[in-house]
């Protein structure tokens, strides 16, 4: 499959200038991205960056087998490779697919060459990097200042933004890593949201039934980072188009 800017649904690829897209286009390769697919390994040299069109990637930091926490998520609104955009060749976090999807990948070497050729492209991608850092900052705030139910509601809102439907595919195991809490705490928080009619839980899936009530439950934990992204790249539509 060849990339054409008028048909791509990754928002970064769709919104960059036509000349900048032309720099990237010959090196973009369509790839399927199954659940648990590792996109970046901790401390490993990053070989490819991924512009997702479907699915959700999680950025997770770890300090030992029992201490892992998600610090960011990426969907159709963005790309992997924050470290590359900021001038490094590796990251201390790992990035893997949490919900299966697909998208475009390109070699890091090609991206660097393209950014060297176009200052406009470099600036555009640095603005995106700013939104990722902002998201991570508010994740830290949520983890330090909000209770499990509020953090869960925020995470479900963020996943819903990227899911393309009201169904968010995940497991309690994933959620415990995402929120940095034990599985019984996740189960209890999900049960409370379901009891209130906000979500419906199934095996490996959560269905969002009342987004407004979910955002109210987040109690301000959700929204600031999303508003910053919208300020720089527009509000757009929730979820990919295919």
Image: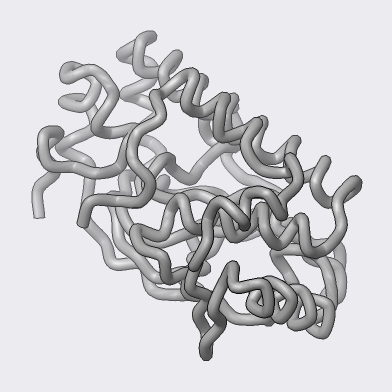
Determine whether 186 is above or below 110 in the image.
below
Q: Nearer the viewer, residue 52 or 211?
A: 211
User: Residue 205 vs residue 152: left or right?
Assistant: left
Residue at horizontal 73%, vertical 43%?
221
Residue 65: percent from the left, percent from the top? 83, 75
Q: Quadrant of the N terminus?
A: bottom left
Q: Nearer the viewer, residue 89 or 230?
A: 230
Which of the 4 quarters of the picture holds residue 198? bottom right
Residue 59: percent from the left, percent from the top? 62, 54
Which of the 4 quarters of the picture holds residue 170? bottom right
Which of the 4 quarters of the picture holds residue 226? top right
Looking at this view, name the residue that lies furthest to the right. Answer: 144
Looking at this view, name the residue that lies furthest to the bottom. Answer: 203
User: Residue 46 vs residue 5: left or right?
Assistant: right
Residue at horizontal 39%, vertical 61%?
55
Labels in figure, total: 0
Q: Nearer the viewer, residue 218 or 104?
A: 218
Looking at this view, name the residue that lies furthest to the top. Answer: 119
- Describe the colour scheme in one phrase: one colour
Determine whether 120 is above or below 114 in the image.
above
Looking at this view, name the residue that lies furthest to the front. Answer: 196
Q: Quadrant of the C terminus?
A: bottom left
Residue at horizontal 35%, vertical 10%?
120
User: Residue 176 vs residue 126: left or right?
Assistant: right
Residue 4: percent from the left, percent from the top? 10, 38
Residue at horizontal 82%, vertical 41%?
141
């Amino acid at each position: 499959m060849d990339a054409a800017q008028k048909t791509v649904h990754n928002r970064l690829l769709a919104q960059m200038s036509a000349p900048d897209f032309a720099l990237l286009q010959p090196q973009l390769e369509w790839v399927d991205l199954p659940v648990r697919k590792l996109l970046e390994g901790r401390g490993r040299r990053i070989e490819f960056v991924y512009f997702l069109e479907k699915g959700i990637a999680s950025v997770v930091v770890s300090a030992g087998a029992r201490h892992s926490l998600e610090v960011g998520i990426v969907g159709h609104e963005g790309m992997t490779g924050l470290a590359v955009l900021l001038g490094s060749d590796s990251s201390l976090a790992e990035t893997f697919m949490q919900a299966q999807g697909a998208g475009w990948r390109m070699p890091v070497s090609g991206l660097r060459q393209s950014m060297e050729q176009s200052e406009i492209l470099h600036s555009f991608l640095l603005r995106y990097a700013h939104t990722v850092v902002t998201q991570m900052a508010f994740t830290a705030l949520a983890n330090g200042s909000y209770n499990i139910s509020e953090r869960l509601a925020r995470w479900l809102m963020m996943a819903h933004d990227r899911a393309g439907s009201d169904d968010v595919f995940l497991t309690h195991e994933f959620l415990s890593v995402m929120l940095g809490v034990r599985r019984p705490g996740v189960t209890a928080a999900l049960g409370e949201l379901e009891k209130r009619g906000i979500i419906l839980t199934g095996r490996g899936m959560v269905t969002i039934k009342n987004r407004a009530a979910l955002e109210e439950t987040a109690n301000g934990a959700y929204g600031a980072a999303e508003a910053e992204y919208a300020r720089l790249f527009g509000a757009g539509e929730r979820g990919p188009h295919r």
